[in-house]
Image (tube, helix red, strand yellow):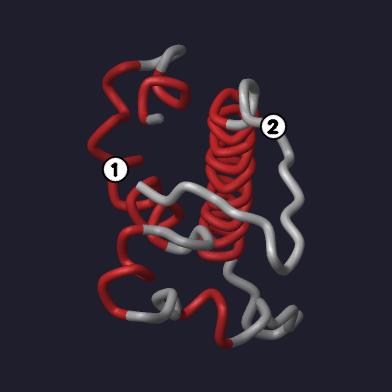
Amino acid sequence: MLRCFISGNPRVWEDLLPHVESAYNRVVNSPFEVVYGFNPVTPLDLLPIPILDDVLCKDGDEKASFIKELHNDIKLQIENKVGKYVELANKRRKTLLFDVGHWVWLH
């Protein structure tokens, strides 16, 4: 997954690694959620970015927007990959319907 984001500039992988990890841990059924039972809460989830003319920090606002956009991109890529895995796994499966009284073989 990291390869997708650093393809243009491989020297930035150290800067992107914490963001990719955080976004990966926030996806539904992530390893974090499976182990701990909930998705991690980040400061970006708690408060919207305030827009104040008096105390406007463009660098911080740009960084927060960059991180939110990066997390959304990573989440979409993970969801696309999971969809492809589900499609491949279900490719040869048949839908079988059983009624009460039918005999089935369980292994």
Front-lying residue, 100 or 15 = 100
Q: Gap between marks 2 and 1, in whole Å?
A: 40 Å
Left or right: residue 63 compared with residue 32? right
Left or right: residue 26 compared with residue 32? right
**Residue 68 at x, y percent in the picture:** 59, 57
**Residue 25 at x, y percent in the picture:** 38, 60
Could you say whether the residue bearing mark 2 is in a helix, strand or loop?
Answer: loop
Note whether 46 is above or below 4 in the view shown. below
Q: Residue at x 23, y 37 (%)?
A: 14
Q: Residue at x 41, y 80 (%)?
A: 38
Residue 46 badge: none
Give amino acid for label 1: Leu
Q: Sequence order check: which comes first, mark 2 or mark 1?
A: 1
Residue to which mark 2 is pinned: 94
Residue 17 badge: 1
Location of residue 65 (image quadrant): bottom right
Left or right: residue 64 compared with residue 54? left
Disc 2 to disc 1: CB gap under 8 Å: no
